Image (tube, rainbow, N blue to C red):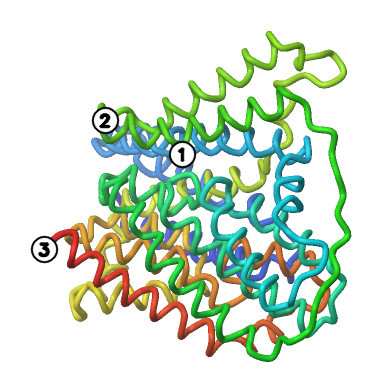
Amino acid sequence: MPDYVSWILISLAVLALISIIFEEVIHINKAQSVLFFGSFSWVILFAATSGTDSHHLVEEGLKENIGEIAALWLFLTAAMTFVAYLNKKGLIETAIFKVLPNNISERKLLFLTGLFAFIFSSLADNITATLVSIALILSLQMPPSKTLRFAAVAVFAVNSGGVAMITGDVTTLMIFLADKAEITSLLLLAVPAFSAVLVLMGLLMLPLSGRVGITKTSHDLQTIDLIIAGIFLFTILTTIAFNVVFGIPPVLSFLTGLATMFLVAKFMGEDTEDDPIMDYIRRIEFDTLMFFLGILLVVGALKEVKALDSFVAIYDYLPAWQANYLMGLFSSIIDNVPLTAALLKSDVTMNAGEWLALTYAVGVGGSLLIIGSAAGIVAMSKIEALTFASYLKFIVALLIAYTLGYGLTLLLGNVIYS
């Protein structure tokens, strides 16, 4: 394969990264730009190897790349469809308001907001968890200075809650599907992750002293809504159990759960012409799925030309625990999906405890800057006062919480794998 091909693909990958970072400046959805660069990279690969012995290898590489993407896509589609249904029916909002009293102190409310964001993001995708958390915060109609504190906690808690569950964070799912971490070990990540959230909440609640009145809304929930919520929770539990006991891939368990949801809705009369149950697939965030598709195509193409070898050079100069910590910091600038994909494709050598630490780092590190995670971008789009600069005011508290969580994760890894 000609050497110039490598430089072309690296240039396209850099352009894809720039398009992600400056999405708000160029006004082009990152999913659109990255999908172009990803698919075009493979077009160049096939054209450059046409008629050579390398053409077959590129073809096999694309099949492997598409297979990995398909497993991720189908899993996320199933999980996001469940959440789209429950959110549309108001079950999630109803559950929140049942827990909250009519009048509550700001400090206690901050704690409950962080707790909800942490738990919910482990069950749903980060975007949905952030949207629901921010909607709750905005409904409180607090002054901007206090709203920002609640938003910072929500963003950090959403990212922290997702790292312990394959249903909660794409990078956790990617690391699990690559057989770098066991599902039982990932579940234990909830302990250091929530400890870090507690530290952040403790730091940010210090200036708060007032009380907040909560105006509650109600939804007319049907029996079918509660049954589907039960199917969702049962699917999550069986996904974990079946993988541990039988080695069943999570995507199969979730697709079975989704099919069960469709059939139950049909038999109970919920699948109507006015509200077809299959239509909830159309309500999920497809731009997010297209973004993941583009990113994984870009990284897959780079792997074919061995351009990722230099990416992990930092692991040759630093111990893995230090390099992983830095990767977490990098993820606040570089999207954690391409960062994780590049590390997985480069075949960096680490033990199970170090992969666990990386899972935490890339999952939570993006919280340090508002542009570093999908949760941050969503929050910034919904709260006018939340900007890059206003969020930066919390950088010290965020860095303390992230560092503590990372340190506890290292300790956890040593305990599990010693």
Q: Can residue 176 be spotted in the picture? A: yes
Q: Residue at x 43, y 54 (%)?
A: 171
Expressed as whole percent of the image width and height from the top left, the position of residue 343 reads 32, 60
Q: Residues within 10 Å of mark 3 (few under 14, many from 20)?
A: few
In this rendered view, identify the residue nearer to me: 300 or 271: 271
Residue 254 location (% of width, % of height): 48, 29
Which comes sooner in the sequence, label 2 or label 3? 2
The alpha-carbon separation of the residues under discs 2 and 1 comes to: 17 Å
**Residue that carries the numbered disc 3 in the rendered image:** 418
Q: Nearer the viewer, residue 351 or 198?
A: 198
The residue identified by callout 1 is 72
Q: Residue at x 47, y 80 (%)?
A: 401
Q: Secondary structure at mark 1?
A: helix
User: Closer to the camera: disc 2 or disc 1?
Assistant: 2
Label 1 sits on what residue type? Leu
Residue at image position (70%, 46%) is: 95
129 in relation to 71, above or below: below
Which one is in front in this view, the residue at disc 3 or the one at disc 1?
3
With respect to residue 252, does 310 lie above or below?
A: below
Residue position marked by numbered label 2 in the rendering: 247
